[in-house]
Amino acid sequence: MRHEYADSVILVTMLDKIISERIINEGPITFETFMDMALYYPELGYYTNPATVIGKDGDFYTSSHLHPIFGASICRQLIEMWEIMDRPPVFHAVEMGAGAGYLCRDIMDYLIHDVHKADNSSDAGDFMKCLQYVLVEPYGHFEKMQRDVLQGHILNVKWIKSLDELGPFEGCMLSNELLDAFPVHIIEMDKGPKEIFVNMNDQKLVEDKADINSNEMEKYIDRFDIPISDGYRTELNLRIKSWLEQVSSVLSHGFILTIDYGFTAREFYSEDRSNGTLLCYHQHRVNENPFSNIGSQDITSHVNFSSLKIYGDEAGLKTCGYSSQGIYLTASGLDELIVDLYSDSPDYMREISRIKGLILPQGMGESHRVFIQYKGEGTPELRGFSIRNEAGNL
């Protein structure tokens, strides 16, 4: 049965026409190819278009937009990692998918705050001398936005276009809502697994189905025990594997910190979640039609964190922990940060109200997950997983 989109519209934008012409000339394209073009086509995709705005004035916002205490918590996590690694003289914090640069700014701001406290007894000063923050940013409009946000911190930040420019490093690779934007394949069970393709019909984009012609997809379906009952529909994020392999190849010693919304494989591919997780965001409104607002709306799919663990194991990475964001931030000492930063603030209650959005289940506290891997000797224990570590469920 074809998945219909009631509000599909006749193609009118330049990117609409480019996609339709490719289909007309070359035949149907996989949904993964469509999603890649919709998000990353040069100058016209959602993330490559200079007109795209992310944050409270855009289509969606992340934890770093919600409150700067999120960045302060991540800063303390980086310091803990640096200490576990015996304080290397250069510690790289490499961030991918930084958006406007708020997380980097809040990390730097907290470091400066900690260094200048009257009763300073922390290691922030020593850490700051060793820290080299690197933003992996392929798009010029985002780099410009980040440079504007990071005024005053430019000397501590380096920009590169890709990981290839960095070479082997010690430190931490961190990302906040990066992997959910990787283009995904969609499959639907119809007397066996079929892949969803995008085709043209009466000047509109429509779905087609065809037999799977990919060993990698077939292995993924078997590996994660995806239900085969007719009508079951879900997404396969195959790009996570190559991304993790690339990160592991340049990380000589250190951690990978991944924050995103997602599930274990058992939760992701349960019979109850029979229509997948694909969602679109346009002007802070959620819809399920990827064929509308092409190039001007975000398209996302939840992350299968079990795939990160399995592919990480194969790439020589060890799992330190997996937890909900709320539990992780609480265990990391969020209460200490609140007292440190806001106990004397006249806006204390307003700050607390905003911070709750980071930790409560109805906010980002349960939907967003924190996953940390390690490359090196042993398997470090991190404070953020001291209350609950769900890595065994992966």
Image (spheres, helix red, strand yellow):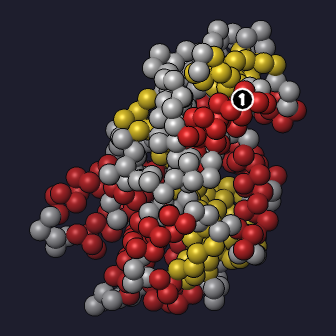
User: Which quarter of the image is occupied by the C terminus?
Assistant: top right
Residue drawn at 20 percent across, 70 percent down: 343
* Residue 380 in sight from this viewpoint: no
* Residue 283 in sight from this viewpoint: yes
The residue carrying mark 1 is 23
**Image coords of residue 299 (percent x, y):** 53, 38
Residue drawn at 51 percent across, 84 percent down: 156
Q: Nearer the viewer, residue 268 or 181?
A: 181
Q: Nearer the viewer, residue 232 or 284?
A: 284
**Image coords of residue 130 (percent x, y):** 57, 87
**Image coords of residue 109 (percent x, y):** 37, 77
Query: Residue 205 occupies which quadrant of the picture?
Result: top right
Q: Is residue 353 above or below residue 292?
A: below
Type of the residue with mark 1: Ile
**Image coords of residue 73 (percent x, y):** 42, 66
Q: Nearer the viewer, residue 148 or 228?
A: 148
Q: Is residue 347 above or below residue 216?
A: below
User: Which quarter of the image is occupied by the N terminus?
Assistant: top right
Q: Is residue 241 above or below residue 110?
A: above
Residue 213 appears left or right of 15: right
Query: Residue 304 occupies which quadrant of the picture?
Result: top right
Q: Nearer the viewer, residue 197 or 63?
A: 197
Residue 7 appears left or right of 206: left
Q: Is residue 132 above or below residue 316?
A: below
